[in-house]
Amino acid sequence: MQRTATAHLDLTLRGQADLAFIVAAADRWSSSEGRGAMEETLTVTHDGAELTPREIPDLHGTRMHHVRASAGHVVLDYTVTVTGEGAPEAISPADLIRYVRPSRYCQSDELWPTAAAEFRGLEGLELIDAVTGWVRDRLSYVPGSSLPTDGATETMLARRGVCRDYAHLVIALLRARDVPTRLAAVYAPGLTPMDFHAIAEAYVDGAWYALDATDLAPRRSMVRIATGRDAADTAFLSNAGAEVILNQIAVTAVADELPADTSAEPVRLA
């Protein structure tokens, strides 16, 4: 399968700022263990002059691109084409501890009573399927309905949100049942409305499985961008030093085929 994705960010900086972009596909295709290939271009300009971003590796193949720029107009353009599948991920014992802890947006400690009452006696693939279905049935997908500061607890009370809210609630409920679960930011061919997308990944029976309670795009065609505890680790832009205004964001993702996706089918994300 071949997938092509693009990202365009148009920013205004009110002063000198450090910018960290996470838009590049995760580094899963450079290893000899991968069964595919990746071609990409990334450019950043400041008032029309090209900057040279510094690539900073993060967990699970995540790649940040850092620039420092003065007040003015910054534009990022990224294009990637991936073919086949990336290299499998080595399982880290530290990850299996890290991803059962509560985090900024996934308050599994607060949601422990709900998880215990709703999913008692379930485990393994049956548990992750039950939690994903529970979230799917109880939330309404409403663009603009949540705040950037909302976490899983707020989402459950509001009963609505966008993809990151769905993912945070799945993650929090599974962590409350002692299942290591993390967030993956992805390019998602077939997604409507098109944007960066967020899903959950749960560790069961020795493997990480992709969970998407929104059912908005087939999981097998997704391209991993970043992986972490929650949205705090996977934001497409972080800034420090000055006010940054996001003038425009445009994301595209297409595939030469869109595979069928049954929500209950176990799927592993490359």
Image: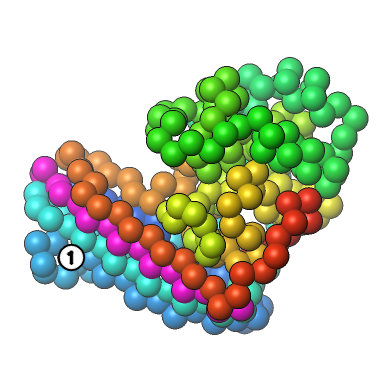
Residue at 63% across, 60% down: 218
Can residue 203 be seen here? yes
At mark 1, the secondary structure is: strand
Task: Quadrant for residue 209, please give it.
Answer: bottom right
Is 62 drawn above or below residue 31 in the view shown?
above
The main secondary structure of the magenta stretch is strand
The three-letter code of the residue at mark 1 reads: Thr
Position of 234 compared to 107: left or right?
left
Position of 148 compared to 158: left or right?
left
Between residues 228 and 118, which one lies in front from this camera angle?
118
Can residue 97 be seen here? no
Between residues 206 and 258, which one lies in front from this camera angle?
258
Residue at 83% across, 47% down: 125
Residue at 34% across, 49% down: 237
- What residue is shown with label 1? 45
The chosen color scheme is rainbow
**Residue 180 locus on image (x, y percent):** 71, 42
Magenta segment: 1-16
Is 93 drawn above or below residue 137 in the view shown?
below
Task: Quadrant for residue 78, please give it.
Answer: bottom left
Between residues 207 and 199, which one lies in front from this camera angle?
199
Label 1, residues with CA under 10 Å away: few <14, some 14-19, many ≥20: some
Residue at 82% across, 29% down: 119
**Residue 81 locus on image (x, y percent):** 47, 77
Is 268 drawn above or below residue 85 in the view shown?
above
**Residue at the right extreme of this rendering:** 121
Where's the C terminus, which quadrant? bottom right
**Residue 34 locus on image (x, y percent):** 63, 77
Is 32 drawn above or below residue 118 in the view shown?
below
Between residues 60 and 211, which one lies in front from this camera angle?
211
Position of 26 compared to 239: left or right?
right
Task: Quadrant for residue 223, please give it.
Answer: bottom right
